[in-house]
Amino acid sequence: MNKRFKKIISLLICLAMLFTLTACSSSTNTPKETPKKTSDGLSFTPGTYAAEAPGRNGILKLEVTVDESRILSVKVLEHSETAMLSDAPIQQIPQKIVEGQTLKVDTIAGASLTSGAILAAAKEALTKAGGDINKLMQGVEKEKIQVQDAETDIVVVGAGAAGMIAAIKASALGKDVILVEKMGMLGGGDTMMASTLLNAAGSSVQKELSIPNSSAEDFYKQLDGIATQKNMPADRTTLKTYADRSGAMVDWLVDLGVPFGRITNTFQHKIKDGSAPGTHIVAALSKELNAKKVDYRLNTKATSIIMEDGKATGIEIETPDGNYKIKAKAVIVTTGGFSNNPELLAKYNPTWLNRPTTGSASLTGDGIIMAEKVGAALYNMDQVKANYLAHVLEDGSAVSLTAINNHTVLVNHDGKRFVNEDHGSINYKSEQMMMQKGHEAYAIFDQTVIEDLKLMKGYNDSGYFISADTLEGLADKIDVNKENFLKTMKDYQSYTINGEDKEFGRKISDPIDKPKYYAALVTPSMQSTYGGIKVDETGHVISTEGKVIPGLYAAGATSGHGAAAGEVGYALIVAVVFGDVVGEQAATDIK
Ligand SMILES: Cc1cc2nc3c(=O)[nH]c(=O)nc-3n(C[C@H](O)[C@H](O)[C@H](O)COP(=O)(O)OP(=O)(O)OC[C@H]3O[C@@H](n4cnc5c(N)ncnc54)[C@H](O)[C@@H]3O)c2cc1C
């Protein structure tokens, strides 16, 4: 297929998506024409109208400005929606209402409650403005466009950190790339959720802050030591690659605008203001995909890998507009883990199966299932990670409070501590919490955390925490034995002064003594999986017969690379480094 024909096909597909107002608008195939609007015949009383509606965590307020015949702007003014998950609907839905002059806008997959709140409030505001709601609900005219097959050099499946970076890398090396993502937004898997840190060595951030012993060799030694101590199934060549390449990847992300500026424990890169790294990384990579004009397609789900003569030659695609095929010289699978696939969890490791989940709903192991069907070997599938700091919301979903792990003391309903809060194993801490009444505990912290960590301030604004001016006052508001609780906190303060935790051996440096005091009810959740498709050190998929499957690659949480460090939370850097590695390898192989 020649390039011009390919472009026309891509354009047709994207046009189809644009007219259904899916989030394809930022892709390179965005057509120049404006879609036909419903504005013909619309009439309003000019002005600005405020309205509100209940969202996922509380009231969302917005204002709509109209002239006689058009919606001029929709602005979300206030909300307490979950940080990260609400970014896409808050950015995209108001824009789509104005672009289409319609209230018939698709909600963002994975953020339907926030999407619904914006649409409900906009509807109320436009009613106040005297708009014809029936007409506004009709939506834009949908052009009947047939989706068609496409052809490219490399197709990347799944737009998390691994997939976006693989696509950017392969494109920078001169290859035609199509990146497909089944959700309505980029990064909508676990990358968007990454709440705390990115581990790396030898970065410019570490150099600027003069962090001692932070070289790639030091990092490798630490990784190797942890893997040996915990008897983890970690391939040492893989560990070496990510120790060696991690610093350069952090520097690249900083160049793209990710504001890393704090280091803890030598290698943990954190965002300057204590916000979550995931959203910054997704924003920076999305910008780069647009800048480099990479063809990415949202609401586009891969359903199977096409094989010809033992070689992967493309994927089958499912979209709201119909199904089609993308033929490619290389297929890179970056679909994340399977934390939301109960069948796979039951089969490989059911320990945390019936717990709430802090992982993304989109992680259903699609890539692992597709690759296994074409003969790929799977490995480390029993490696799963819980999160002992999950806070469950009213709707049953859960958010991770991992960012406070070094700044909190955990007490059970009896008012007593039960574990070294800094113990190196997250699964161990989760197991200890499961033994407490209600399988839960209170994470206690103080105002320092709220001031220091922007993510926690956001969660506090969302009403997730209970607070009081004194520890006595806090004890009255939560379900603990007050006497025990106050003694526990008094003992803890004395340990911070002496630096010695006589009960659990924690090395304590942070006192909890700055009012207000906060409590968050936490419980273990199912967070991430670290097993997956077997790959060699540069991402070629290995078959059950131990041979490379030509044309097929995998990286990130779908590949099982993460098992190298699943227990210690190094997963995001694995996706970042091996996204880069696999993009380069696939581009090199198809030369
Ligand atoms: C709450 C939470 C907090 C975390 N915090 C940290 C942290 O602080 N530090 C750290 O190192 N790690 C952290 N992690 C782990 C880390 O975020 C992940 O390991 C990493 O982001 C995985 O990236 P990925 O690109 O491999 O997968 P993902 O980011 O999950 O991306 C996979 C993508 O593939 C898409 N997809 C799936 N199936 C299909 C299909 N059939 N067709 C098309 N697209 C598909 C998904 O929608 C998704 O967008 C955290 C994880 C969670 C859940």
Image: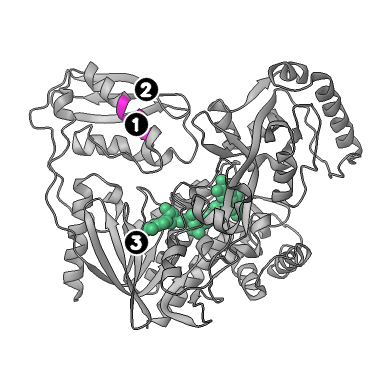
Seen at 48% across and 72% down, the residue is: 582
Seen at 45% across and 72% down, the residue is: 553
Tell me which segment is drawn in magenta. 114-120
- Give the residue type that dot 1 points to: Gly
Residue 588 placement (x, y as % from top left):
43, 80
Relative height, residue 324 to residue 98 (above, below): below
Mark pair 1, 2: CA separation: 9 Å
Indicate which disc, 3 or 1, sits on the residue closer to the N terminus: 1
Q: Secondary structure at mark 2?
A: strand
Would you identify the image quadrant in which residue 475 lies? top right
Q: Which residue is mark 2?
A: 53
Left or right of 288 on screen, residue 383: right
Q: As rendered, which of 342 and 158 lies closer to the eye?
A: 342
- Give the residue type that dot 2 points to: Ala
Q: Secondary structure at mark 3?
A: strand
Tag shown at residue 116? 1
Q: As rendered, which of 422 and 90 lies closer to the eye?
A: 422
- Give the residue type that dot 3 points to: Thr
Most common SS among magenta residues: helix
Seen at 46% across and 24% down, the residue is: 58
Q: Which residue is mark 3?
A: 303
Residue 452 placement (x, y as % from top left):
65, 36
Seen at 80% across and 43% down, the residue is: 420
